[in-house]
Image (spheres, grey):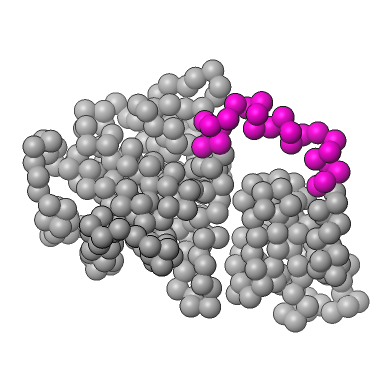
Amino acid sequence: MSENSGGSYDVKGLNLFRSFPVEAQGDGPLLSSFQAFETSLYLLALRRYPAALISCVNAWESAIKAFHKMSPDDKTDLYVLLDDIFNKHKIPRRYRESVTKVRLKRNVLVHYGASPSDDQESLGLILKTGFPFYIYLIRYFFDLYLDWKEFAPNAKDFYELKDHPGSEKCVLIPAYGDALIQAVDLYTEFGANPLIKDKEFCCAKIAYLISGDIKEKIFTAQEAFSDVWNEEWAKFRDSRGRLMQEYFDEWAWVFDCPICRSGDSFYGEIDQHRSTKKSIRLNRGVCIECGFQIQEGNKGVLDKMLQPQLGDAMPNILKSFSFYL
């Protein structure tokens, strides 16, 4: 693993990975697999969901070829490789049908292109099957972890593992790994709800982090931040906050943004119809820093994303609004 003077990692050309174990470096297709997976994350951040799906499936294929140590001349089709691993390895059967669905969708996108109507379906397939299956393959075949919590389920923080033997098996930079798993978990909980039409909020965290990485590569640090931390921006930020309070008719509480983590920047509207004198529920909200927003009728999404902040703030919110509830 190498680290440049700017503090960002560069592992064999990979930007989101923190390590590449020695025992895996001889597997050329594994490096290709990691590159395809990283490309999928970048495309996800750019909201190119069909293209992200294609790259994700390419990552599957290269991982399987790396496990079998196949030569570049081997042209075995992906469906054959998938049938082989399902028949010969103890891979959960729940993946078989969903993996086939993703593979067939990938084929359609590759040969016939994509339209905007493919976006939500592609995003759903990535978060429901694409990433979870890839995480499983990497762990099962190579004993490597994209989710460090699978490696150390009792650790509260990744940095508890700093000197832990084998921690190099946790290959993703922790912030990206945590955001990736958050995306999968949010889709698992809310993806099947037909009342929620746009599922992009599920991947907002990982998209925000990677978009920052993209921005850093395009602009210098000075260009990216010189016009942010100044007096004019502070005044603008305060005025946005006042406008949000007025917009929500003062029925709002300020939280740290769950996406960009900016302090006191996310204005969550208190749901007057679902809140009681014992429990507060949120209806919609917006961050005045990064612009992330959840519209009304989110069916519990906002309450979930703002935990544990909402739980910690509950006594103070109840005290402030109990007279009106």
Q: Which residue does the image show at 85% across and 70% down from the upper left? A: 249
The quadrant the C terminus occupies is bottom right
Q: Which residue does the image show at 47% across and 44% down from the upper left? A: 177
Residue sticking out furthest to the top: 5
Q: Give the overall secondary structure of the magenta segment.
A: helix
Answer with left or right where residue 14 lies relative to residue 64. right
Q: Which residue does the image show at 43% across and 26% down from the upper left? A: 10
Q: Is residue 40 above or below residue 268?
A: above
Q: Position of residue 222 (x, y in %)?
A: 66, 26
Q: Position of residue 310 (x, y in %)?
A: 71, 62
The quadrant the N terminus occupies is top left
Closest to the observer, 214 or 71: 214
Q: Is residue 178 above or below residue 281?
A: above
Closest to the observer, 21 or 180: 180
Residue sticking out furthest to the bottom: 273
Residues rendered magenta in the picture = 213-237
Q: Evaluate whether residue 256 shows in this view.
A: no
Closest to the observer, 318 or 113: 113
Q: Is residue 233 magenta?
A: yes
Q: Quadrant of residue 138?
A: top left
Answer with left or right where residue 81 lies relative to residue 194. left
Q: Which residue does the image show at 39% across and 41% down from the upper left? A: 38
